[in-house]
Structures are given as C-alpha cells and as structure tokens.
Amino acid sequence: MNEFISVFQSRQDMLIETIWEHLQISLLSLVIAIIIAVPLGIILTRYRKVAEPIIGVSAIMQTIPSLAVLAFLIPFFGIGTTPAIIALTAYGYCLF
C-alpha cells in the first residue's frame, strides 16, 4: 500500500495534467455536439418525415459500445485526441 501511495505522489503532476486534458476533450466534444444537435432538433420539429430516419440512426448509434466506435475510428484518424473527440461528439449528439 505504501508503494502505491509513493507512486501516486511521485506522479501527481502527471495526474493533474491528464485530468485537465480529459476535461478539455470532453468539453470540446460536448460543445460540438450541442452545436450540431440543437439546430438539427429545431429543423426536425418542422420536418416530421426527415425526423424519423434521423432519430432511428441516433438510436442505433447508441447501441454501439463507445470503445467499438473509437476502435473503428483509429484506422482513419490514428491514435490520439481526434478520434476521441469524434467518438464523444457522436455520442453526445445521440444523447441530445
């Protein structure tokens, strides 16, 4: 247990940095999802015929595990923040 605490204390600056990076990625993807979802929601209230297929696609996307979406995006965008932001944006959009 003491070994765990000493490793935690020695890497405390790295922990704070990665938490901040995680918050930035999450907030950025949330803002992008809001920018997409709110106008789309307003448009869909006016055009009912288009609303049903888009809602259906959103429902299907929610059934796919988030790790699978991320793994699918890696060959196209590589490993890093870009596929994470795209995956989180897609999930955030589906939740609105």
Image: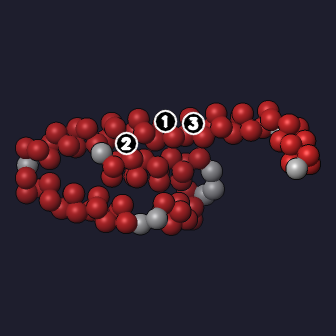
Whole-percent x, y for residue 62 in the image? 36, 61
- Residue denoted by label 2: 33
Question: Badge 2: how crowded within 10 Å, few (<14), some, or many (20+)?
Answer: many
SS for callout 1:
helix
Whole-percent x, y for residue 95 in the image:
33, 49
Residue at image coords 54%, 51%: 84
Q: CA distance from mark 2 to mark 1?
A: 10 Å
21 sits left or right of 37 in the view? right
At label 2, which amino acid type do we have? Ala
Residue located farthest toward the front when viewing the structure as drawn: 1
Residue 93, compared with residue 39, is above or below; it is below
Whether the residues at callouts 3 and 1 have beta carbons within 8 Å, the answer is: yes
> Is residue 86 depicted above or below 39 in this figure?
below
Residue 90 numbered tag: none
Q: Residue at x 80, y 35 (%)?
A: 12
Q: Is residue 20 above or below residue 82?
A: above
- Say which amino acid is labelled 1: Leu
Name the residue that disc number 3 marks: 23
Identify the residue shown where x is 22% and y is 57%.
55
Q: Residue flagged by tag 3: what amino acid is it?
A: Leu
Q: Is residue 14 left or right of residue 74?
A: right
Q: Which residue is mark 1?
A: 27
Element under disc 2: helix
At 22% across and 63% down in the image, what residue appears?
56
